[in-house]
Amino acid sequence: MMYRLGCPRLAARPRHPADLLPQSVVEICAANTSGGNTTGVSVSLSHVTIQGNWQFENSCAVQMFGVLVGGGASLRLADSVVEQIGDFPLQGCQSGVGVDAGNSLTGQVGHATLTDDTIETYQKNGVVIDGPGSTGKITGTTVTGSGPTPTIAQNGIQISFGASGSVTDSTITANNYTGTPQEEGDYPTYADGILIYGGGGSVCGIGAVSPLVRGARLTGNTLTNIDVGVQLFNVNARCDKSVRTPTRDEACGNVIRNSHGYAGGTASADANIAGYETARKAFIGYQAGVADSGNRDVICDNHFGGIGYAQRDATSTLPNPRPPAFVRPIDLFSFAPPAHVRVYGNSYNGKKYKPHYVHRTLGQARAARVAGVRAVRS
């Protein structure tokens, strides 16, 4: 089944050459003849199975999508399955997205409402909502990655670079990278369950103007066996501090558990070993239930559990935490500490959990209290 309404400017995802060609099972596009966004095109699909299973000689030269929405179009997808979006067997090419709405690099806008869907066997991301004006509302949806793999760092749901959206009452599981940094480009690498990503300029964003993600709502979800359950990441143009602009993203009322850990100081076969680079240029593992770099974000009433999020190493060891990993149920301090974050009502393994974070000023680090949080020894 193919919806192809002509989207001439719909092309590359971040970290991909601009000449990559999109290959989609379903494409919904409202762009005009010059490639600009329009309004008024809305497509509803329900009780369908959308399946990729491509066979390319060089899949790194294409972008693979189950459903691609652009040109200002809107999609309502309900009670459906999107699967096999990528290479089989799994490859490391940074492509293969189950449902993609919008594109920040090309200026395309897309809107996606997903209700009670299943997104699985994707190569890179389950769902992406990307670019200014793009919106996503994801409810009751199950997103399942490939489980522990050294091949590629997958993300369940991504909202990025000026897009807005919510993820509620959904289940995200099995996004778990076990490879080395060298296998993913020689930089710190881990998988995310829900990734909110904005800013970063030309250093870790999409260019000098890299829009923030503001007001994202992530509530009532269940996230299991993921390196970082929820990542709230909005940073300045140098990619070294949180932004001054309030982002007000919210992660509340979620259940976030991970059984892949570091018992006895040794990484299990399914634990991350590549997610943190120390100041001495050594790589160690990194796992967190929620990690935050933003401004006036809220992290509340979440229930964390499992050895995979058991707190390891003191914050005083930063920026050189000891092997095998730096781990926290809530990480507010290992990279670009958030500003004015509110943290309350969270628990780890049934007990109250109140983290603290490191506030960096003029290159110095010190422990600081945050609203709703008392400083504790880490």
Image: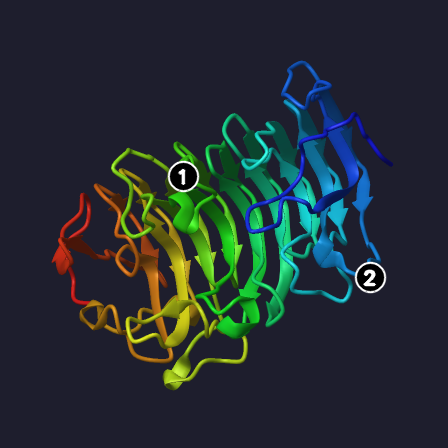
Give amino acid for label 2: Glu
Asked whether 331 or 252 is in front, the reply is 331
Residue 250 drawn at (x, y percent): 37, 39
At a point 48% along the width and 48% down the height, the residue shown is 195
Residue 208 is marked as: 1
Q: Taking the image as drawn, is residue 21 in sight?
A: yes
Question: For the residues marked 1 and 2, what is the alpha-carbon distance in whole angstroms?
Answer: 35 Å
Can you tell which quarter of the image residue 339 is in?
top left
Q: Is residue 83 above or below residue 91?
A: above
At a point 64% along the width and 34% down the height, the residue shown is 114
At a point 27% along the width and 58% down the height, the residue shown is 353
Total of numbered circles in the picture? Answer: 2
Q: Quadrant of the C terminus?
A: bottom left
Residue 57 is marked as: 2
Label 1 environment density (alpha carbons within 10 Å; few <14, some 14–19, many ≥20): few
Q: Quadrant of the N terminus?
A: top right
Q: Earlier in the sequence, mark 1 or mark 2?
A: 2
Q: Is residue 330 left or right of residue 146?
A: left
Kind of element beneath mark 2: loop
Q: Taking the image as drawn, is residue 121 in sight?
A: no
